Image (cartoon, rainbow, N blue to C red):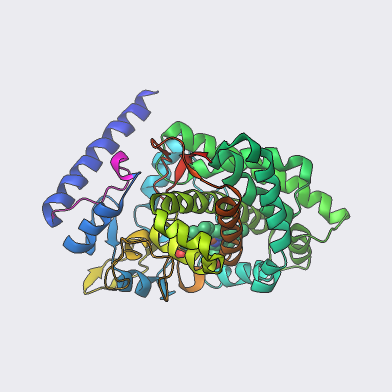
Amino acid sequence: MGFRQQLDQAQTIAESAFRALHEKLESGVLFLPIQKELRSDPHPYYRRLRERDPVHRSRLAGGWVLSRYEDVLGVLRDPTWSSDERNWARHPVYRARGERAGLPDPYSEHFASMLRLDPPDHTRLRSLVSKAFTPRAVEAMRPRVALLADELLAKVESRRSMELIAEFAAPLPVIVIAELLGVPAGDHEQFRRLSDQAVKLLGDGPLVERKRGVAGMRAIRDYFAAIVTARRSDPQRDLISALVAAEEAGDRLSLVELLSTLVLLLVAGNETTTKLIGNGILALLRNPHELERLRADPGLMENAVEELLRYDGPVQLTSRMAKEDRELCGRTARRGDQVVLLLAAANRDPDAFPDPDRLDLGRRDVRHLAFSQGIHFCLGAQLARLEASIALGALVTRLPGLRLADASIRWSSNTVLRGPEALQLAW
Ligand code: HEM
């Protein structure tokens, strides 16, 4: 590490320590989601935050942290809160520091996608792909997803044990999205490796991991660029060809936007669905009565998936930016403030869900925020629901006596997406 980088690091540590102290003295709580002990169960911490300081001034996050259901929902539903991180006052500082450490600015690298854009660009990009994700289009994928789940389980069934994540929960969504996009079957393995690598860019992993994430993201973009070129001369009946046609039609989609849309579809849908299956099976195994209830009544599955999303959805948080000084839940947010929305905390708010820490697969009206709300509501929600219900259904019906083979679980270090990195099961 060069002298400049060492100086940078020392400055970052000193600044963060000062901000943390300021934050703790000011409100009595510190918002620090990267604490290791939160990985296995962040909910007691979320509860503390929600009860003690639900509209929390976070010096570390450069803004606010909301943890109550109604507050989080209010911001999500209001599109005048920006999703564009360039509106965050701290963004230039982080970008400069990241660049010196070898991490490019996502926007200058063109990784920005609809997820981090505001209308009208967001509306235009979203409308181009939304057709592929309508309930009808997704329902048509049911037999294929069921077959893929069966094939994966057939490989391990007689062995009576497996590592759930690597052997089932990770490959399933990657193959589904690869097929939907039109990635050739022979490339699926490579595609999965790159996707796993790229996701390291999210969250607060060590710098070396985030650098690997950048490399993965670039490799995926180059890979997609090659397929796009091939589809120009030889269109197929797949999503990539449909997007290429939109790009060629003129002013609706640029090549850069096309590539970042493809990257988003890959990255947004894989790790999330994998972790929903992982968290979901863990919650069922830890609540044997509920598992039995589901086995006895498979018709409960649809509702069960909603409750599992509420109880332990993989996406812990998202954020919005204030484009001008404005009111925020009775306080004043300044222009450039970030508002961190703790989706996972909102989903356990007792004012929205009675007895929120209880898993109840029959719970009525589970209006959780695991897929967000408003204009950025998860585009892949229907697909994720379909995949999770098929995957969990296959696991609980085909593997009698299913149990955790190893109680010590390795949790992912990603603070945005929470879930087990590996889960050893036996039956
Ligand atoms: C359990 C699985 C999943 C969860 C929990 C999840 C969660 C989310 C959340 C919370 C957001 C919105 C973030 C915000 O408001 O700032 C989002 C957006 C998005 N998700 Fe998902 N997601 C899942 C699966 C998928 C799948 C399978 C796909 C597609 C193949 C997908 C595609 C997208 C896209 C394209 C967006 C951006 C939408 C927009 O900005 O308008 N997601 N997802």
* Quadrant assignment for the N terminus: top left
Question: Magenta segment: does it hold 3?
Answer: no
The answer to whether 62 appears left or right of 294 in the picture is left
Q: Is residue 404 shown above or below 148?
A: above
Q: Relative to the observer, which residue lies in front, 380 or 203?
A: 380
Question: Magenta segment: does it hold 35?
Answer: yes
* Residue at image coords 46%, 56%: 291
Give coordinates of residue 48: x percent, y percent: 20, 57
* Residue at image coords 63%, 44%: 171
Magenta segment's dominant SS is: loop
* Residue at image coords 41%, 38%: 409
The answer, for residue 114, to whether it is visible in the render is: no
Give coordinates of residue 252: x percent, y percent: 69, 69
The answer to whether 327 appears left or right of 141 in the picture is left
Q: Relative to the observer, which residue lies in front, 303 or 11?
A: 303
Kindly indicate the quadrant of the structure image that contains residue 242: bottom right
Furthest toward the right, the residue is: 234
Give coordinates of residue 364: x percent, y percent: 41, 75
* Magenta-colored span: 28-38
Q: Relative to the observer, which residue lies in front, 229 or 389?
A: 389
Q: Is residue 47 shown above or below 229?
A: below
Kindly indicate the quadrant of the structure image that contains residue 335: bottom left
Kindly indicate the quadrant of the structure image that contains residue 216: top right
The answer, for residue 425, to whether it is visible in the render is: yes
Q: Is residue 78 shown above or below 273?
A: below
Number of residue marks: 0
Give coordinates of residue 211: x percent, y percent: 50, 35
